[in-house]
Image (tube, grey):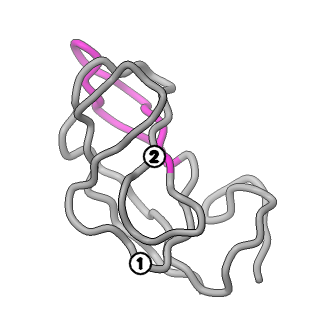
Amino acid sequence: MKTGIGSAPFAGPEQAPDSYSFVDSAPVTAGGTGYKVGDVVQILGGTFSKRASIRVATITGAGVVATVTIADAGWYSATPAGARPTAGYTRGSGFTTTTTYDTFP
């Protein structure tokens, strides 16, 4: 098992699997509405031991997500495909991302 603290692909003191995929990029597919800068949402789908989350970096108009940063790259044994919906404790809705993944090691 690998360990790490604080940055992608390691985002905490948890034990990572010996081999896993993690979010490498999360471009905005649909910006949704009602989001605020700093909102954190999770990427839905895939098989994971830790789900990836992304943070809203910039918005336009009525809280439409323009750009994001990766808050936690996650640990996936099977990555989700296509445009992925997101969920989180925000007032926003409708934001999707088409994530790309890298593999460790």
Q: Quadrant of residue 94?
A: top left
- Crowding at label 1, few (<14), some or many (≥20) Cα neighbours within 10 Å? few
Q: What numbered label is drawn on residue 42?
A: 2
Q: Is residue 1 left or right of residue 71?
A: right
Estimate the x, y position of residue 13 in percent, counting from the top left. Answer: 81, 60
- Residue 61 inside the magenta-drawn segment: yes
**SS category of the residue bearing label 2:** strand
Estimate the x, y position of residue 47 in percent, counting from the top left. Answer: 45, 71
Q: Quadrant of the N terminus?
A: bottom right
Q: Residue at x 26, y 68 (%)?
A: 81
Q: Residue at x 40, y 51 (%)?
A: 43
Q: Residue at x 28, y 47 (%)?
A: 85
**Number of marks drawn:** 2
Q: What numbered label is drawn on residue 6?
A: none
Q: Is residue 8 left or right of residue 5?
A: left
Q: Which residues are magenta?
A: 53-70
Magenta span dominant secondary structure: strand
Q: Quadrant of residue 11?
A: bottom right
If you read the primary sequence from the N terminus, does the residue marked by circle 1 or circle 2 appear first?
Answer: 2
Q: From the image, tell me which residue sits under label 1.
A: 78
Separation (CA) of disc 1 from disc 2? 16 Å
Considering only vertical position in the picture, is 100 above or below 27?
below
